Image (spheres, grey):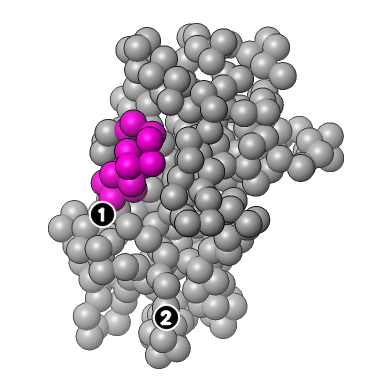
Amino acid sequence: MLDGLRLDDVRGFVFDIDGTLLHRGPDGRGRPQPGAVEVLERVRASGRPLVLFTNASHVVAEAIARGLREDGLPVADEEVLTPIDSATTYLRRRHPGVATLLFASDQVKRQMALAGVRAAEREQAGVVFVAHLDEVELPALERAARAVAAGARLYTGSYAPGYAGAHGMIFSRGAMITAAIAKVTGARPRVLGKPSRAAVAEVSSRLGVTAAELAVIGDDLGMDIALGRLGGSRTVLVRSGISGAIELERIPERRRPDAIVAGIADVLEKL
């Protein structure tokens, strides 16, 4: 259902990964979807920039890019973005030098520290940021809750329930941690990944293209399509992932994509 939608005049592309360009098997390895490699190659051949924006925040973007290449999806390190990238930029600009309590892997903490985000040690945190963390201790949650109750801002990479996996939805542990802090403090967490204005700004900066000149292509109505609509981009919903069974007629018009396709290969003819 791409009738009437033009992509040949788009100046940059944002693709989701899981459920859009590849599916992960029970072993956790990604399997590129039919047409995924060809779509990326055709966009590059046209001279237009692209980025793959995933809401995964367990590792840094370079590690994700390396894994994608191993799985057969040819992408450069600089062609991958995560909420860690948009959050780092946002925190440096809006909260420079503020002690930040991070719920993140050691790898992510190191990258954010190197980029200038100051981790809270013994002092009271002025900011709490939640990425993905496999395990969390209750004293750490309580420390974060007390900081937020005292005025610290609560940010999260994603507040979506989860994402498409080999056997259905994989629940977001970052959302679970964020929800625990929000529940006891009454705070409303602000998302810095998809969908958010911080993410829109990060994509535009990386590609050197205004959001209105972009096309956002993904399988999640609440993250990918919402990101595109937030920035005024053209949007394409791919039914190969988490939103495959959604009846769009029941979705408010303001949340609908500009076009719908069964799989990523269907956009080739429009590039």
- Residue shown at the point (81%, 39%) measured from the top left: 247
Q: Main secondary structure of the magenta part?
A: helix
Q: Can residue 192 be seen in the rendering of this structure?
A: no
The correct choice, above or below, for 128 with respect to 235 in the image is: below
Task: Please say if the residues under marks 1 and 2 sit with CB atoms less than 8 Å apart.
Answer: no
Q: Magenta includes 114? A: no
Q: Amino acid at mark 2?
A: Val
Horizontal and vertical percent for residue 150? 42, 81
Residue that sits furthest to the left in the current view = 114
| Magenta-tinted stretch | 61-75
- Residue shown at the point (39%, 51%) measured from the top left: 83
Give the side of residue 91 with respect to residue 255, left or right: left
Q: What is the number of the mark on residue 136?
A: 2
The correct choice, above or below, for 227 with respect to 48 in the image is: below
Q: Quadrant of the N terminus?
A: top right
**Image quadrant of residue 114?**
bottom left
Q: Amino acid at mark 1?
A: Arg
Residue that sits furthest to the front in the current view = 27
Q: What is the number of the mark on residue 92?
A: 1
Horizontal and vertical percent for residue 193? 45, 50
The correct choice, above or below, for 11 with respect to 18 in the image is: above
Q: Magenta includes 68? A: yes
- Residue shown at the point (54%, 78%) measured from the top left: 180
Residue that sits furthest to the right in the current view = 250
